[in-house]
Amino acid sequence: MVPKPVFVGFDDLNAYLADQCRKRMTDTLRGYKSTIGERFSADAVQLQPLPAVPYDACDKQSVWVSSLSLVRYR
């Protein structure tokens, strides 16, 4: 990405990246016999749907903080 691209917001950046991905779908990478698009189609069959509810990927616990800003966790 030289020169560095400039975008107004994330929507513009995402649109640019999606366009670049679509352009590369017919490319064949060194060491592979099938195109990127063919390999993605084969992989997409194995993808699972997103969960119905958002997953909170953290552990929230109330703890005490010492005067030295130390926290005991588990």
Image (cartoon, helix red, strand yellow):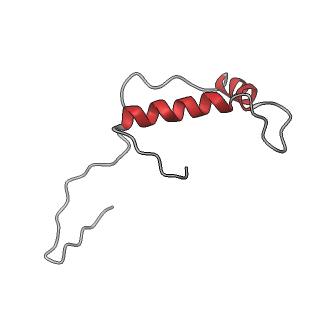
Q: Residue at x 82, y 44 (%)?
A: 30
Residue 55 seen from this side:
no
At x 49%, y 33%, the residue is 16
The quarter of the picture where residue 9 lies is top left
The residue shown at (46%, 30%) is 15
Q: How many dots with numbers?
A: 0
**Could you say which is closer to the camera, residue 18 or residue 72?**
18
Q: Position of residue 32 (x, y in %)?
A: 83, 39
Residue at the extreme front of the image, as rendered: 3
Nearer to me, 1 or 51: 1
5, 29: nearer the viewer: 5
The quarter of the image holding the C terminus is bottom left
Q: Residue at x 38, y 32 (%)?
A: 11
Is residue 53 left or right of 24 when viewed as pictured?
left
Identity of the residue furthest to the bottom in this view: 68
Using the rendered view, name the quadrant where residue 43 is placed.
top right
User: Is the residue 57 above or below the residue 11 in the image?
Assistant: below
Whole-percent x and y of residue 55?
Answer: 38, 34
Question: Could you tell whether 6 is left or right of 42 in the image?
Answer: left
Determine the residue located farthest toward the left in the rendered image. 67
**Residue 60 visible somewhere in the drawing:** yes
- Placement of 46 over or under 61, stated as above or below: above
Q: Position of residue 10 (x, y in %)?
A: 37, 37
37 to the left or right of 31: left
Looking at the image, is 36 positioned above or below residue 72?
A: above
**Residue 26 % position (x, y):** 74, 28
